[in-house]
Image (cartoon, helix red, strand yellow):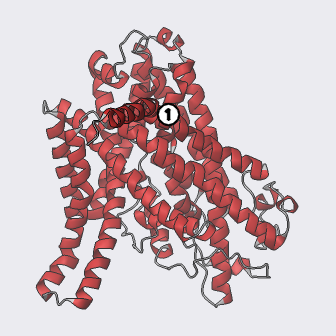
Amino acid sequence: MCPLQVSSAQICGAPICLSKGNSSSKSTGENVLKAVEELISDQPYTDTLQVPKEKDFDFVSEESEVKSGTVLGAVALITGTTIGAGILALPAAVAPAGFGPSSTVLLAAWTLLLGEALLIAEVNVAIMEERKEYRREHGRPATQLTVGLAEMAGRTIGSEGQAAVTLGYLGTSGTLMVAYLAKSGEIFGQASQLSPETGAALFATVMGLVLYVGGTQAADVVNRFLTVALLALFAGIAVVGGGQADWSLLSYGDWGQASSTVPVIFLALVYHDLIPVLCSYLGGDLRDVRKSIILGSLPSLVMFLTWNAIALSVVSEHSGGSDPLKMLIENAGPSLSLAVQGFSGAAICTSFIGTALALSDFAETQLSTVVDKVGEKVEIPRPVYKWWNKDGVRATALVLSLVPPCAIACNNPDIFLGAANFAGAYGMTTLYGILPPVMAWNMRGYLADTYGPSQQRSTDSSQVDEPNSDPSLIDRLQELVPGGNPVLAGLALSAFAVQVMRASQDFGPQIHELPKLVMAAASGVLDAPIG
């Protein structure tokens, strides 16, 4: 996942205005960020879910004041966001299962996550419409205000949900930083004949300096170049690798190992942190949002299937658990090996830049708040305060965002796959698997209480697709995922099942040993001498 275009402002609700440089690596990034800069400057006006009652409004004049993006631009954003470091973990994660079982899981996970993305969009647009109503009632101009995931949770679940989402996002991002740094140490250390620990430390230092000196503008330029290079290298890998592949190796399959592939596949396919920005970018048009999500997620699915086929075509069932990516680099021809190394490096860099920016943005906001509160009680020398606001807070935020993950990665150079599994199995499944159905359940319940049972509101999007349809609020709040509460429950339980399966693998042996440990402890107490 390459989340450069989504900062902690959208995820955690932090009051951060993005600069022009903090855009996506896609050609539409500047347009997105120009809109987002205007959107996130407004602050929430209420802490409770309150969808206004239906009234007559001049939607034509409102829409004329709001700039909307294009479906093509949104598709490019989703495609570019999905292709990141997660793709590097796929070969090693799916090799024990083989191509057939892992491809089946990939298709199933794509379908599940498509439904989850549509639910996030449904709830997000509902809250956007709520805000439009509020602004009209108070005579304020219309704006497509970005509604972050944490704020969505706060509106539909409560303040506890908002706090949990913020903590979950930070924990998941920190885990991903560890994974990215560990993999960067392996890739760049191997290329420069350095140890993985040294490679990770140098990578963190260089990237930290780029982010500190150049800021988001430099990061944006680097990210755009790397994304173009990444796509070009993948095309080369597909062409050259297809000619060198031993396709007979893809016949191997072990369905018993299929469940173990889910966490990394889940992580690789996630683009859902982009959905709030996407809804704003498209002006809350559910027709365009739905079309963009479906079309934007298809190219990455095809790329992942192709990548798996090429990577697994060099690994047999007797390979002894070797990493297919590493074997591809070592055993392929010079041109293919170089292309895979370049692709891996670009994927790590794009993902690292986005996650590092998001974490440092969040840390910078929190540090500024703390210093401002301290300044109210303790007199801070003006030169120190001036330095802090200009350079100190950004430098400190970057240090806090990079040093702890780098220390963990350097002490555990082989942690990449484990960290990716952990982030996918617990963080991603909670934020983008369990949370969206819960939010949609509560939102739909509120709409049912306000406007009548959900079955009275068409789940057919024909009204949304029709430009001249009645533009009332309720007509704009269609259910993008049909099936009612049973489908919502099924989606949430599917994500929860992923967590349970992974937990049984992570903690099952310890749980099985627990009775023996208890009995041993009890035996020791009973056998202890008295007095």
Q: Which residue lies at the image location 49% right of the left edge and 47% below the top edge?
A: 428
**x, y percentage for residue 372?**
28, 83
Q: Quadrant of the N terminus?
A: top left
Residue at the location (30% across, 57% down)? 219
Front residue of 140/203: it is 203
**Callout 1 secondary element:** helix
Task: Please give left or right for residue 91 compared with residue 66 in the image.
Answer: left
**Nearer to me, 375 or 310:** 375
> Which quadrant does the C terminus fall into?
top left
Q: Residue at x 26, y 64 (%)?
A: 215
Who's the residue at 39% across and 21% down the image?
240
- Can you give x and y, in whole percent of width and height, for residue 157 in the image? 61, 66
> Which residue corresponds to mark 1?
504
Q: Residues within 10 Å of mark 1 (few under 14, many from 20)?
A: few
Snapshot quadrant of residue 363: bottom left
Percent position of residue 443, x then y: 70, 65
375 and 242: which is toward the camera: 375
Q: Is residue 119 above or below residue 100?
A: below
Q: Would you place residue 326 above or below residue 317 in this image?
A: below
Residue farthest along the front direction in this orientation: 531
Which of these two is toward me, 148 or 215?
148
Answer yes or no: is residue 290 visible: yes
- How many numbered marks does the figure carry? 1
Place of residue 334 in the rendered image (x, y in percent of width and height, measured from the top left)? 26, 20
The kind of residue tagged 1 is Ser
Q: Does residue 412 lie above or below 447 as drawn?
A: above
**Residue 82 can be seen, yes or no:** no
